[in-house]
Image (tube, grey):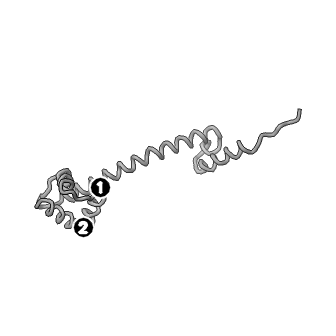
Amino acid sequence: MTRIKRGYIARKRRTRIRLFTSSFRGAHSRLTRTITQQKIKALVSAHRDRDRKKRDFRGLWINRINAVIGKNKKKMYNSYRNLLYNLYKRQLLLNRKIVAQIAILKGNCLFMIANEIIK
């Protein structure tokens, strides 16, 4: 019997996976089985960390707002919770990201908004 050479499809699939893992170290970028395992692991981590990034930024915004409120001498709002509760009660559509940017860049503006909410 003559020798049958394998087609190019499997090689094409492996090289496509190798391109994805080309920056990995050691066997993680050289051995086919390890490459496929590392690709799966990398994609799982990327998916998990996209949600984690959203969580981390939300915590950062909350900390920034709380820090600016804590620095206030008049102690209009003693907590972040009361400020946001009153924002939603007055139906001001400002999310935490925008409130944090206002607090960092224009702290006086945040307290002007807070004064309007109290009245």
Q: CA distance from mark 1 to mark 2?
A: 15 Å
Name the spot of residue 45 as percent of width and height, x first: 48, 44
Q: Residue furthest front?
A: 91
Is 63 displayed left or right of 33 in the figure? left
Q: Quadrant of the N terminus?
A: top right
Which numbered circle lies on residue 61? 1
What's under tag 2, amino acid-wise?
A: Lys
Along the horizontal axis of the image, is 119 left or right of 85? left
Residue 53's mark?
Answer: none
Residue kind at label 1, given as amino acid type? Trp
Residue for point 18% across, 53% down = 89
Q: Are marks 1 and 2 in contact (CB under 8 Å)?
A: no
Residue named by callout 2 = 106
Q: Secondary structure at mark 2?
A: loop
Q: Quadrant of residue 105?
A: bottom left
Residue 114: quadrant of the picture: bottom left
Coordinates of residue 118 in the picture (x, y in percent): 12, 59
Q: Residue at x 31, y 53 (%)?
A: 60
Q: Is residue 95 left or right of residue 74?
A: right
> Sequence-wise, which precedes: disc 1 or disc 2?
1
Residue with the most extreme top position = 1
Name the residue: 37% across, 50% down: 54
Residue 97 in percent (x, y) is at 31, 58
Q: Position of residue 53 (x, y in %)?
A: 39, 50
Q: Residue at x 10, y 61 (%)?
A: 119
Residue at the limit of the structure toward the right, as seen here: 1
53 vs 112, left or right, is right
Between 92 and 53, which is closer to the camera in this rendering?
92
Q: Residues within 10 Å of mark 1 (few under 14, many from 20)?
A: many
Q: Residues within 10 Å of mark 2 (few under 14, many from 20)?
A: few
Secondary element at tag 1? helix
Q: Nearer the viewer, residue 46 or 29?
A: 46
